[in-house]
């Protein structure tokens, strides 16, 4: 039975990895993998499959509700042109300055609105500023690295950090304290290398100021942007105050925004009001990605329930032995395999009895899994989004950006370990 469950998981993983050649959406493959692994366990395994499934569904639902709330808030901000303010911040004619601004803004924005959404926003803005396609793709590569680095030190910046936070492996304070400096180095080293390479003034398609297209009033735009960012930042505070799961705080913020936007647009006609409503934002969120997370987390849950992951943990301990190296390997693997199932697997392989909450193993895992995927363009959701938006070839990214991303990843890891050595933790 265990062999069959593992075999189904491997086949499902291969289908996900080769999504484009086989022309089957990875969400479909993930859902089938999740269902078939649990079906096999229920039919061929011992009693208890239903109880184990109910336990995993409860944990997975928290993550999905959290993501639904966050993605809806971001879509609502975008519908009100709230992100237009970022264009004003990054308007410049110096290439090195543009690299610095894009890196800094991406790094901090991704810690609030997640790395995938940040990448989409920043790539769209960059197209309005820089006309040279080769240079633009290079900076887009930096955006991917900076977005992943920025998401790694925030509990709401990346799905994997959210998983570890909700799962109780890390707290917000420990995550920020131990990974912020490493994440800064991870983003800064590639940015410095590119800034030294790009010289001269920017030649854009047209003046950035002429690209401004405010479709909403300044008051609406600022109210929704402020309320949206405030709602996202409120989530850790809500959890600390109430000790309720983070998704409750996210849904609270969404509810407040829903009420406020309904009141703001109460006097408008239905056609215009509809485009600015939460109902419209809910229809725009990336539902296939949500189903992908559901399927893959179910599949990993099945592996955990049949105790495969504990066996893998033992093999890693016997083969590598060093927890830090295990984390670095997991980070590099996340460039090939999606970091969500890797972190889910690690959460199943290692218990809180082995590594208590805020142990450096979990904190280092958050950094490695969040940033290691930048080494390949298919290694993160941010990279895949950039690949689609700018039509960046896998080989081009491997040649021009992967080395820089690896430099940042290993540099940040070295800083993390040095910081731990010097200050403890």
Image (cartoon, helix red, strand yellow):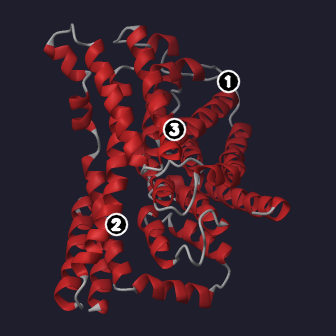
User: Quick one: which residue is furthest to the right in this view?
Assistant: 422
Left-right relation of 279 to 206: left
For marks 2 and 1 on the same chain, the one whose residue lies earlier in the sequence: 1
Q: Residue at x 28, y 84 (%)?
A: 5
Where is mark 1, residue-wise? 94
Where is mark 3, residue-wise? 112
**How many callouts does the rendering have?**
3
Disc 3 secondary structure class: helix
Q: Residue at x 46, y 48 (%)?
A: 382
Q: Residue at x 35, y 26 (%)?
A: 257
Q: Residue 288 location, x and y as percent?
A: 25, 52
Where is mark 2, residue-wise? 297
338 up-or-down from 121: above or below:
below
| Foreground pick, 409 / 71 | 71
Q: Residue 350 location, x and y as percent?
A: 52, 77
Rounded to the nearest angstrom, the CA distance separating label 2 from label 1 is 45 Å
């Amino acid at each position: 039975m265990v062999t069959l469950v593992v075999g189904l998981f491997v086949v499902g993983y291969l289908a996900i990895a080769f999504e484009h050649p086989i022309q089957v959406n990875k969400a479909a493959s993930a859902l089938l993998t999740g269902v078939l692994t649990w079906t096999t366990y229920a039919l061929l395994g011992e009693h208890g499959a239903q109880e184990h499934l109910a336990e995993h569904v409860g944990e997975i639902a928290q993550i999905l509700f959290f993501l639904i709330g966050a993605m809806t808030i971001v879509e609502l901000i975008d519908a009100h042109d709230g992100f237009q303010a970022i264009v004003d911040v990054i308007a410049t004619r110096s290439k090195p300055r543009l690299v610095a601004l894009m890196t800094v803004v991406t790094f901090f924005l991704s810690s609030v609105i997640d790395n995938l959404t940040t990448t989409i926003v920043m790539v769209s803005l960059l197209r309005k500023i820089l006309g040279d396609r080769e240079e633009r793709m290079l900076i887009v590569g930096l955006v991917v690295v900076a977005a992943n680095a920025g998401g790694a030190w925030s509990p709401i910046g990346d799905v994997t950090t959210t998983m570890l936070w909700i799962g109780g492996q890390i707290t917000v304070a420990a995550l920020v304290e131990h990974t912020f400096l490493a994440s800064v180095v991870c983003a800064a080293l590639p940015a410095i290398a590119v800034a030294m390479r790009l010289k001269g003034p920017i030649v854009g398609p047209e003046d950035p100021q002429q690209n401004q297209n405010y479709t909403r009033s300044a008051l609406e735009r600022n109210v929704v942007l402020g309320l949206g960012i405030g709602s996202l930042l409120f989530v850790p505070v809500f959890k600390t105050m109430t000790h309720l799961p983070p998704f409750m705080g996210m849904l609270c913020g969404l509810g407040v925004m829903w009420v406020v936007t309904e009141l703001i647009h109460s006097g408008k006609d239905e056609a215009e009001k509809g485009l600015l409503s939460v109902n419209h934002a809910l229809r725009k969120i990336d539902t296939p990605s949500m189903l992908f997370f559901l399927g893959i987390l179910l599949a990993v849950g099945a592996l955990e329930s049949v105790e495969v992951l504990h066996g893998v943990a033992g093999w890693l301990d016997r083969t590598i032995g060093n927890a830090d190296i295990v984390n670095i390997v997991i980070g590099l693997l996340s460039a090939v395999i999606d970091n969500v199932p890797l972190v889910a697997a690690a959460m199943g392989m290692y218990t809180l009895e082995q590594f208590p909450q805020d142990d450096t193993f979990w904190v280092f895992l958050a950094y490695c899994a969040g940033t290691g995927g930048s080494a390949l363009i298919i290694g993160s959701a941010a990279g895949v989004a950039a690949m689609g938006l700018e039509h960046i070839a896998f080989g081009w990214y491997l040649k021009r950006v992967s080395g820089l991303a690896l430099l940042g990843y290993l540099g940040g890891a070295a800083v993390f370990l040095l910081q731990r050595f010097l200050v403890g933790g």
